[in-house]
Image (spheres, rainbow, N blue to C red):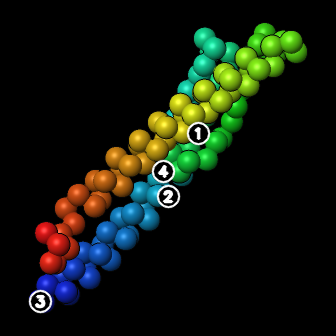
Amino acid sequence: MSSIGKFMKQAARMQQQMEQVQTALANKTVDATSGGGAVKVVARCDGTLVSIKIDPAALNPTDAQLLEDMVLTAANQALEQARKISSEEMGRITQGMSIPGLM
């Protein structure tokens, strides 16, 4: 089989694996908290937020800025965890990919 034929088969197999991983990532969740657990954010590993939970004790109208900061911190932590897992999963698929002329 020609090297272009092998490459095309490898690319098709990789595309199928990527689609399977993307589907799995859309169902996998991570969570992060801030403010000692006052704010909890759950994100999917496809980069979407699932939920944000705020402890009612953290709802102080005079401290809105603090609550906003806690939500932002927890959301960024959850999304970073999701990105890391996504990168690791996708990296496993492309790890053995050899492109003729480049490697």
In the image, what residue type sits under mark 4? Leu
Q: Is residue 39 left or right of residue 80?
A: right
State the separation of the CA atoms marked 3 and 4.
Answer: 34 Å
Q: Position of residue 100 (x, y in %)?
A: 16, 78
Position of 9 relative to 33 (above/below): below
Q: Position of residue 77 (x, y in %)?
A: 53, 31
Question: Quadrant location of residue 64?
Answer: top right
Q: Is residue 57 left or right of residue 11?
A: right
State the separation of the CA atoms marked 3 and 1.
Answer: 44 Å
Number of the label disc, if any, that sits on residue 25: 4
Position of 23 relative to 100 (above/below): above
Q: Is residue 23 left or right of residue 11?
A: right
In the image, what residue type sits under mark 3? Met
Number of the label disc, if any, that sits on residue 23: 2
Number of the label disc, if any, that sits on residue 1: 3
In the image, what residue type sits under mark 2? Thr
Residue drawn at the location 73% of the way across and 25% of the way down: 68
| Mark 4: secondary structure | helix
| Mark 1: secondary structure | strand
Q: Are marks 4 and 2 in contact (CB under 8 Å)?
A: yes
Q: Nearer the viewer, residue 70 or 2?
A: 70
Position of 32 relative to 28 (above/below): above
Residue drawn at the location 86% of the way across and 12% of the way down: 62
| Mark 2: secondary structure | helix
Is residue 57 visible in the rendered image? The answer is yes
* CA neighbours of label 1 inside 10 A, class few (<14), some (14 to 19), many (20+): many
First reached walking from the N terminus: tag 1 or tag 2: 2
Check disc 1 and report the residue beneath it. 43
